[in-house]
Image (tube, grey):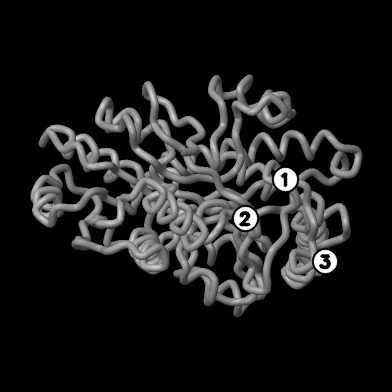
Amino acid sequence: MKKKTLLFTMTLLALIVIGVLVYQNSFKKNADNKIGVILSLTGKGASYGNRSLNGIKIAVDELNSRDFFKKNKIVLVTEDSKSNANNAVMAFEKITTIDNASIVIGMVLSDEVLACAKLANEREVVILSPGAGSIAITEAGPYIYRNRESAYTQADAIAKACYDLNKTEVAILYSNAANGISYKDAFKKSLRKYNGNISIEIGFNEGLNDYQAEIERVLQSKPNAIYLAGVDREIGLIIKQAAELKNNVQLFASAGAVTPKLLEIAGKGAEGLITVSESFDPTDKAVKESVFVKNYLNKYGELPEWVAANSYEATMLIGKLIEGGCKTGKDFKHALDTVSFQSFSGTLTFDNNGDVIKSTRLLKVENGEFVKYSR
């Protein structure tokens, strides 16, 4: 009786071990098409993160309809960083060690990308950011890529616009975060190139509701333009409160301003704001007829903007690389170093630092909308 019990127990254990091995083998196979996603779905970056996720989902639906992915579909492993760098690191740990993803789309906030960069390089896991603009990301390491252009590119376009409008005495209000500091530094460098002068630069803390003290200090410096660098909530509040002070100084802003949320917060105060964004234009006839824009409009009831478009492009690019045989982080890195991918901005390539090479366009707020601006 004891022998039978022992035999039964050993057989049961053997079956469990076999089951675990089969599951692990199946898991490894399925992991080949896993894409990690770390985004700010809540917190200060939520307006960017949720629209980024929307673009990613549109791309995954499109890719999984292809014959290549029908047997082994792309699966998203999505984590909310809650707009916090420490949470982003924990999410990266989980996605790379438990879920075994070898490529991650994210993050949309620069400080989160920078916080995860060391781990990504050590573990040879690619990070492809659709939204982070900090100049520090250029030097973040060999496994860090982004299909959103560097702050230098966008800040230079704004500085040139200041020069063209003869707005050469400029005050800067910037967020005390990686994104805001990078755009501030890049803009200062570019403005000097165009013989402009910085009348004053003031940093502000995110998450507050009253920025009138900072605005008043800026106005006391007698600028003929103000450059705002940060994310949409704070820039929107500053624009609104500046308008309440009957300020009529020309306002410029970093690309973080280009969201519906900013227009909602700033209201009529946003009229005349000049900013910069990706060359992606959802109102362009050819772009409007694209599968992406049609599907996005149908699913979400609004036109996509730059972060959704970048996220869609990043996912479609990864799909192309998977179809080409990429499985490991090394595979993805080597492929991205030489890739040539047709995007909404033309042919997308990356330089030696993992920075995307693409053009920008200036925008101006007119009648409550961002429209293409040219002087």
Secondary structure of the residue carrying tag 2 is loop
Question: Circles 1 and 2: CB distance less than 8 Å?
Answer: yes
Q: Position of residue 292 (x, y in %)?
A: 69, 31
Q: Earlier in the sequence, mark 1 or mark 3?
A: 3
Q: Amino acid at mark 3?
A: Leu
For the question of whether residue 75 can be seen, the reply is no
Name the image quarter holding residue 308.
Answer: top right
Between residue 345 and residue 90, name the one nearer to us: 345
Between residue 362 and residue 350, name the one nearer to us: 362
Residue 147, disc: 2
Q: Amino acid at mark 2?
A: Asn
Secondary structure of the residue carrying tag 1 is strand
Name the image quarter holding residue 184.
Answer: bottom left
Residue at image point 42% right, 35% down? 364
Q: Position of residue 110 (x, y in %)?
A: 44, 61
* Residue 123, above or below 181: below
For the question of whether residue 228 can be seen, the reply is yes
Q: Amino acid at mark 1?
A: Ser
Residue at image point 45% right, 44% down? 41
Left or right of 92 in this view: 13:
right
Identify the residue position indicated by label 1 in the image. 343
**Which is closer to the viewer, label 3 or label 2?**
2
CA gap, disc 1 and disc 3: 62 Å
Identify the residue position indicated by label 3 in the image. 7
CA gap, disc 1 and disc 2: 10 Å
Q: Residues within 10 Å of mark 3 (few under 14, many from 20)?
A: few
* Residue 294, above or below 249: above
Q: Residues within 10 Å of mark 2 (few under 14, many from 20)?
A: many
Q: Position of residue 291 (x, y in %)?
A: 74, 28
Residue 363, disc: none
